[in-house]
Image: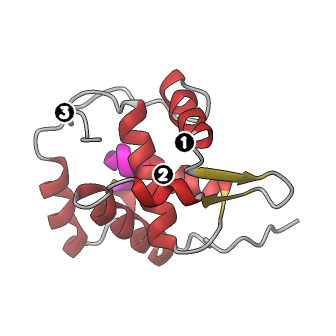
Amino acid sequence: MTPSHPSQPPTAADIQLAVVAVLRAYGKPLWERHARLAAGCCVEPFWLLPLLTDNEMDWWVLCCRGLGVRQTQWLFTHTDEWCKALWGLQQRGELIEHTVQLEWTLGEAAAGVDTTGWPDDRAAFVLQVLGRAGFDLTNEVML
């Protein structure tokens, strides 16, 4: 899978690459909401802008060169492309959803998904920025 043109809304394939790359970069099961947030930031890098330091802005400019301002949909959990992406990952055994723990983890079939290049790089960067900005990415739910 290759990413769509950056000036277009993310496709199901873009989202699938982001989800797999985020879970790979995290290296263990990740709370579903955190995985969605991180993958959303991978395919919609504008969401990261308020969290970036001056040094990180260099990466952002490189990553987002050519992106036009576009409408983003904050309710990305229910858009058609997100639904297609997650359904596809689950059907192929690349994503396992643990409904009791509210976690996602990679299935064995995810080993065949090539995320080298922008998906891996962007996922690592997004997780770093979210962690530095104070987002607790542990799977502990505060009541």
Left or right position of 4 against 58? right
Mark 1: give few (<14), some (14-19) or many (20+) Cα within 10 Å. many
| Quadrant position of the N terminus in the picture | top left
Q: Are marks 3 and 2 in contact (CB under 8 Å)?
A: no
| First-in-chain label (3 vs 1) | 3
Question: Residue at coordinates 28% horizontally, 65% vertically from top-left?
Answer: 121
Question: Residue at coordinates 36% horizontally, 40% vertically from top-left?
Answer: 14
Residue 105, position as x, y percentages in the image: 63, 61
Q: According to the image, label 3 marks what residue? A: 5
Q: How far is disc 3 from disc 1 in space, using C-alphas?
A: 22 Å
Q: According to the image, label 1 marks what residue? A: 89
Vertical comparison of 86 with 50: above or below: above
* Residue type at the position of mark 2: Val
Residue 62, position as x, y percentages in the image: 12, 57
* Residue type at the position of mark 3: His
Q: How far is disc 3 from disc 2 in space, using C-alphas?
A: 18 Å
* Residue type at the position of mark 1: Leu
Q: According to the image, label 2 marks what residue? A: 19
Q: Is label 3 in a helix, a strand or a loop?
A: loop
Which callout, 2 or 1, points to the residue nearer the camera?
1
Left or right position of 142 against 93? right
Which callout, 3 or 1, points to the residue nearer the camera?
1
**Magenta residues (range):** 41-48
- Nearer to the camera, 50 or 114: 114
Vertical comparison of 37 with 138: above or below: above
In the rendered structure, does residue 47 fall within the stretch colored magenta?
A: yes
Question: Residue at coordinates 58% horizontally, 29% vertically from top-left?
Answer: 83
In the rendered structure, does residue 3 fall within the stretch colored magenta?
A: no
